[in-house]
Amino acid sequence: MKAYRPWTPDQPYLLPPNPRDWLPEGHLAPFLLEVVESLDLSAIECAIHEKDPRGERPYHPRMMLALLLYGYCTGTFSSRKIERKTYEDVAFRFLAGGEHPDFSTICTFRRVHLAAIDGLFVQVVQVSRRVGLAKLGHISLDGTKVSANASKHKAMSYERMVADEVRLRDEIAQLLARAEHQDADDDKRLGPREPELDLPAELRRRTERLARIQVAKAALEQEARKARAAQLREQGLRASRAAERATEDATRERAVARAAARGAAADSLVPPAPSASKRADDLPTHTPKVTRAGLPHAKAQRNFTDSDSKIMERGGEFVQGYNCHAAVDGDSQIIVAQGASNQPPDTHYLVPMLERVRATTGALPAVMSVDAGFWAPSNASWCEERGVDAYISTQRQRHGAATPTEAEVLPDEPALTPQQRMRRKVASPEGQKIYRRRKCIPEPVFGQIKQAMGFRRFSMRGMAKAGGEWSLVCTSHNLRKLWRARLAGVQVSFEG
C-alpha cells in the first residue's frame, strides 16, 4: 500500500512559529501591514487621545485599520464577519496579532473615524503618483449606482403621505371611539375602579406610523421650501444682472422690482441664513421637484430607512441607492478622485470631480474622456479654459454600435455650436482612438469593485457615511492595484 505523508494536527510546537510563515510569499496581508505602518494616522490617534484615559485600553488603530482594509479588499464588509475571521482566517489572525476585537468595536471604529479614513485615500493616491502608476495622461470619469442600506419599498411619495396621514387620522379616531365604548362596557362589567387596559396594539401601530409619516412629510416640505427659495433667489439674481445691463429706465425699474419680489418671496419661504462658502469640489445633491407655492411635487419621495438615498435607475431596474463616481487613470486603473452623492444625473458631477482630481494629485489631467451623461456646453468650456483636452460624447449610442465618423457627423455644415464642435472632435480619427479607450478604463474598475471585491451595497446609512464608505472601497481598490504592481516587479515604496 502507498504510504501517506505524516499528519499530526494536534502536534504541539516546541518553539512558537512565525505567523508570516503561515502565509504564502507575496500575500496581500503583509503588504497591507506595510502600508498601514507607513500611513499618517494622526487624525485617528488625536481623536482617541481626546477621550478620558481611564477605562479599558483601546485596540491599536493601525491594527483596526488593517483589519478593515483587508476586509474590504477581500469582500468582507460585515463587522461580525471580520470578528469571526480573526478566529478562523489565517490572514486576519496575522493582521490582528492574536487579538479578537468584537464586532461592535470594529463597527464603532469604522463609524467614528470614517472622516479620517477618508483622508487616507489621498495618501494612497500620492504614493501611486510617486511610484509612477498614476500619470494623469488620460483619465476617464464615470458613475455607478450602488444600493443603499434601505429598501425602495420603504420610500413614500408626498402624494401618498398626505393621503395616508388623513386615512390614519380617521382610523385612529375610529379606534379611539371603539376604545371608549369598550371602556364603558368594561366599567359596567368589572367596575369603575378596575385598572385600565393597555392601549390596543392596533391603535399603537397606527399612531407610530402616523408619527413617522408626519416627520418624513415635514422634512420633505422643508426640502421643498429650500429648493423653491433657491430658485427664487437665482431668478432674483438674474433680474439684478438684467437691471445692470438695461439701457432704458423703464426696463431697469421692472427688473429691479422683479428682483425685489423674488427676494421677498424667497425670504418668506426660508429666512436668509449666513451663506456657507461652497467649495468647488462639492458634489451636487438631489433637489426635489417643487410647486410655485413651495410645496413638494406629488411624486417627490422620501425613504423612511435612509432619507438621503434616492430611487435611481440602474440597468433597466430601479434601486434605492447612491450615485458613486470615480476618476480613473488610464494607464494603471488607479482611482485618482472619488465621491458619492444622491443626485442621479451625471451632468453636474464633471467639474467637482475634476476639482477633486486637482486637490488630490495637484494637477488636472492632460486628456479626459466621458460618456454622454456628462455632456453640457458649460462642462466643455470649463475644460477648454483650463487646458484639459476633453472628449465628451454628446449623444447616447446603442451598445455595440460603431462611433460615427467625422464626415457622418457634419458632412457639409461647419461646426458652429459647442455641441457640434465636440461631436466633430470625438468623431475625428484621433478622437475615436482616444474615446474608445473610455470603455476599458472606468468600467473594469467598477466590475472589479462589484464582482471581485463584492461591494454591491452600503453598510451604513446617510450620505456622509455612504461617501466615507465609498472612499474606503476606492482606497482598497487602489491598494490592490499597488499590490499587484509590486508582484509584477514595480518598486512600490511607502517611504518618503
Image (cartoon, grey):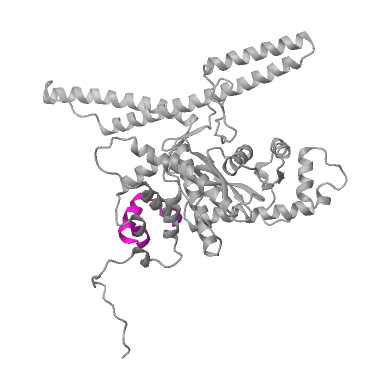
Q: Is residue 31 visible?
A: yes
Q: Residue furthest right?
A: 412
The residue shown at (79%, 42%) is 421
Question: What is the x, y in percent for residue 318?
Answer: 53, 45
Question: What is the x, y in percent for residue 354?
Answer: 62, 41
The residue shown at (23%, 70%) is 12
The answer to if 92 sits in the magenta stretch is yes
Name the image quarter holding the N terminus: bottom left
Span of residues in magenta: 72-93
Q: Residue furthest front?
A: 496
The answer to whether residue 92 is left or right of residue 452 is left
Residue in the foreground of this view, choosing between 26 and 260: 26
Residue in the foreground of this view, choosing between 214 and 439: 439
Choose top left, top right, bottom left or bottom right for residue 213.
Answer: top left
Instruction: Label the magenta part by its dominant secondary structure.
Output: helix
Q: Residue furthest bottom?
A: 1
Choose top left, top right, bottom left or bottom right for residue 324.
Answer: top right
Question: What is the x, y in percent for residue 240?
Answer: 68, 16
Q: Is residue 315 visible?
A: no
The answer to whether residue 33 is left or right of residue 478 is left
Residue in the foreground of this view, choosing between 454 and 12: 12
The answer to if 468 sits in the magenta stretch is no
In the displayed structure, 485 sits above or below 183; it is below
Question: What is the x, y in percent for residue 122?
Answer: 52, 44
Q: How many marks?
A: 0
